[in-house]
Image: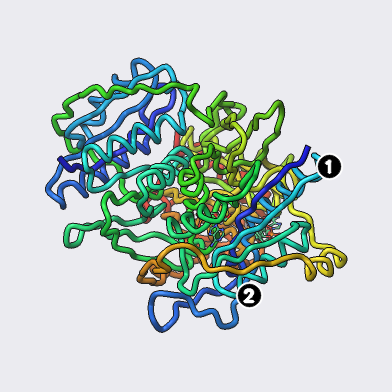
């Protein structure tokens, strides 16, 4: 039967952007291999409502597994269902996103199936019937290309590896019987605590405004927040490690080697010097803007556009102009 | 109570290291590169030491799969306070499943409450070994944990997810992969460094067929040198023009 397994991630019953990316990527791989996309949608009761949306992005079949145990992410339940599906259908490849769930689930499934796993792929191609995966190493200082000849090839797709594209297919819905019992699980997600204020996460935002030590103190981050807000819900606030370590900002906002890896359309670095460990987390951003008073700051070597000067004068002006454009 | 922990650690190039591809196109040129204990694994060692200290009694054993050079990072962990170390030697550089298999094979025969890992190795950036090893051992695991506590024979771990925190409850024994958060690592004291020299460090061959992964390495495409749009707030309109008309991102 073969097919490409595409994990369709949801939160609170809604598909996430990551699911569109994964199905888009799976469609390309399936076309190259001449096989079908099998999207697998797991969640609480009613999650199957998202099936048609997956068809729009190219799923030939959508397998829906609903269970009360799946109201929240179930690490062991999802692993069992995904691994048995892949095995029974003899899938050629299994694609996941690089979200927190994808990064947790994909290596579990690979471990369960006893196959290798390539994470955070930036490119997935098909050569001679096998998946050829390119991915960053050494925080993006080098990229590696590896041919995954064993089946299934288990891969998680890096942010923006595939831009979601509509490519409607039948999307026949089939029900997966998920006989899972929470009592069998050694690890259960008990709770999800939303960060205050339902903010957009840096790893998902198309625009990031990041602040560093140049801000001088936590109170001045309101300049960064206001600039982000001016983009009207499309921008997230990021931070350098220096300001996270100083307790000015939460760790969830840290970009870099020991923080998050991001690849937004636009990354605005304000009062950030551009240390190699910071660059590690944002160097693949599509466009980078730097605002720094030191013309020699390393961030200017990477930035597409730079403004040299005092951020306390530049940022308020920028915020004002962005507001004008957006209104 | 005695708490027994196993900590899996890897030797990796320092974050500042300039990475050059070796002549074979498949590995990096190690000359001039400083190697260190993987920074995430420092959190893992710290967590294990705190478990032992909290319980008053216990044992911390560190494992590493690598070549002879990995003895160095095992000594670092011993100097931080771990009790014993095992080097699982492999001539070919292993990663992912091959490492998980070698680790699982060594861990299987041991008695333990926790197996600690770093969230990722900063050389291969894979984030695979902890979940894979736990799967092979058949024990529960939580990945990317920034804090956890133990009460009533259960572990409550907090994981960072997009826009929030996921709280995972695990049965013991379990595996945890750690990221930055509650376990800021201690420095090895001079006394610790001296004591480490006398602690046991066993060497044996890593289980498995010893075949490494074959990779082709290449440098990322150079980013075109950027330009300074101007100085001070007066440069803002020009910046926005470029972002709209040239980059078309807003
Ligand atoms: C193992 C390891 C892991 C690390 N991981 C990370 C990581 O994940 N993320 C990360 O960011 N760092 C990381 N670091 C730390 C990194 O090396 C730097 O120390 C850190 O990025 C510096 O933060 P910064 O740019 O905010 O501060 P600084 O380097 O102090 O830079 C502040 C900048 O602000 C500018 N400035 C000051 N005042 C003004 C003003 N009024 N107007 C305009 N500009 C101004 C200055 O010119 C300067 O360039 C790591 C380090 C190590 C060793
Ligand atoms: N060669 C190795 N020896 C021991 N532990 C390892 C090795 N490789 C990876 N690990 C552990 O697995 C974690 C994640 O590594 P990785 O999956 O390679 O990103 C590391 O932080 C270590 O705790």
Label 2 – label 1 distance at C-alpha: 36 Å
Residue that numbered label 2 is attached to = B34
Q: What SS does tag 1 mark?
A: loop
Relative depth, front residue between A264 and B43? B43
Point out the residue furthest to the right here: B191
The chain identifier of the residue carrying mark 1 reads B
- Where ligand 2 lies, by quadrant? bottom right
What is the quadrant of residue A134 in the picture?
A: bottom left
Q: Is residue A295 visible?
A: no
Q: Tell which tag, 2 or 1, sits nearer the viewer.
A: 1
Mark 1 neighbour class, 10 Å CA radius: few under 14, some 14 to 19, many 20 or more? few
What is the quadrant of residue A317 in the picture?
A: top right
Residue that numbered label 1 is attached to = B56
User: Which residue is drawn at the image coordinates 28% and 35% (left, top)?
Assistant: A85
Seen in the picture, residue A320 relative to B67 is either above or below; the reply is: above
Relative depth, front residue between A237 and A129? A129
User: Which residue is drawn at the image coordinates 71% and 67% (left, top)?
Assistant: B75
What is the quadrant of residue A275 in the picture?
A: bottom right
Seen in the picture, residue B141 relative to B180 is either above or below; the reply is: above
Q: Is residue B132 left or right of residue A292?
A: left
Q: Is residue B231 left or right of residue B82?
A: left
Q: Is residue B2 left or right of residue B72?
A: right
- From the top left corner, tell me how far across and down residue B101 is, in percent: 46, 55
Q: What SS does tag 2 mark?
A: loop
């Amino acid at each position: 039967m073969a097919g490409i397994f595409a994990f369709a991630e949801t939160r609170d019953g809604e598909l996430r952007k990551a699911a569109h990316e994964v199905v888009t990527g799976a469609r390309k791989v399936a076309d190259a291999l001449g096989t079908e996309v099998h999207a697998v949608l797991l969640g609480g009761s009613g999650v199957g409502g998202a099936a048609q949306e997956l068809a729009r992005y190219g799923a030939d079949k959508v397998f829906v597994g609903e269970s009360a145990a799946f109201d929240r992410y179930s690490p062991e339940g999802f692993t069992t269902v995904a691994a048995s599906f892949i095995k029974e259908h003899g899938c050629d490849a299994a694609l996941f996103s690089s979200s927190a769930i994808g990064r947790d689930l994909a290596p579990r499934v690979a471990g369960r199936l006893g196959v290798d796993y390539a994470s955070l792929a930036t490119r997935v191609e098909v050569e001679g019937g096998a998946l050829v995966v390119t991915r960053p190493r050494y925080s993006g200082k080098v990229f590696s290309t590896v041919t995954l000849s064993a089946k299934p090839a288990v891969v998680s797709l890096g942010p923006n590896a595939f831009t979601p594209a509509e490519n409607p297919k039948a999307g026949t819905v089939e029900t997966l019987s998920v006989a899972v019992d929470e009592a069998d699980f050694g690890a259960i997600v008990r709770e999800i605590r939303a960060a205050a204020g339902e903010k957009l996460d840096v790893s998902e935002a198309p625009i990031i405004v990041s602040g560093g030590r140049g801000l001088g103190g936590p109170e001045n981050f309101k300049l960064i927040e206001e600039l982000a807000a001016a983009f009207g819900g499309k921008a997230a606030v990021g931070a350098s490690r220096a300001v996270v370590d100083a307790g000015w900002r939460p760790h969830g906002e840290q970009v870099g080697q020991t923080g998050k890896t991001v690849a937004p359309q636009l990354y605005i670095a304000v009062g950030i010097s551009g240390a190699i460990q910071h660059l590690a987390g944002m160097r693949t951003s599509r466009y980078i803007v730097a605002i720094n008073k030191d013309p020699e700051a390393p961030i200017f070597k990477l930035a597409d556009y730079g403004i040299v000067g005092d951020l306390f004068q530049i940022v308020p002006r920028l915020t004002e102009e962005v507001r004008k454009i957006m209104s | 109570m005695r708490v027994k922990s196993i900590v899996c650690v890897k030797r990796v190039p320092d974050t500042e290291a300039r990475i050059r591809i070796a002549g074979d196109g498949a590995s990096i040129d190690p000359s001039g590169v400083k190697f260190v204990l993987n920074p995430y694994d420092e959190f893992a060692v710290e967590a294990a030491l705190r478990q032992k200290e909290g319980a008053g009694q216990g044992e911390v054993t560190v494992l590493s799969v690598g070549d002879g050079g990995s003895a160095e990072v095992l000594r670092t962990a011993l100097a931080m306070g771990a009790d014993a170390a095992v080097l699982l030697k492999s001539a070919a550089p292993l990663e992912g499943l091959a490492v998980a298999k070698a680790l699982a094979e060594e861990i299987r025969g041991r008695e333990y409450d926790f197996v600690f890992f770093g969230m990722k190795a900063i050389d291969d950036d894979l984030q695979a070994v902890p979940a894979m090893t736990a799967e092979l051992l058949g024990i529960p695991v939580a990945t990317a944990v920034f804090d956890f506590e133990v009460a009533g024979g259960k572990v409550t771990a907090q994981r960072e997810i997009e826009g929030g925190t996921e709280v995972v409850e695990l049965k013991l024994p379990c595996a945890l992969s750690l990221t930055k958060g509650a376990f800021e690592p201690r420095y090895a004291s001079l006394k610790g460094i001296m004591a480490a020299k006398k602690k046991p460090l066993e060497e044996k061959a890593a289980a498995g067929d010893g075949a490494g992964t074959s990779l082709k390495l290449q440098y990322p495409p150079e980013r075109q040198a950027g330009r300074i749009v101007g100085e001070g707030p007066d440069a803002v309109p020009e910046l926005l023009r470029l972002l709209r008309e040239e980059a078309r991102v807003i």
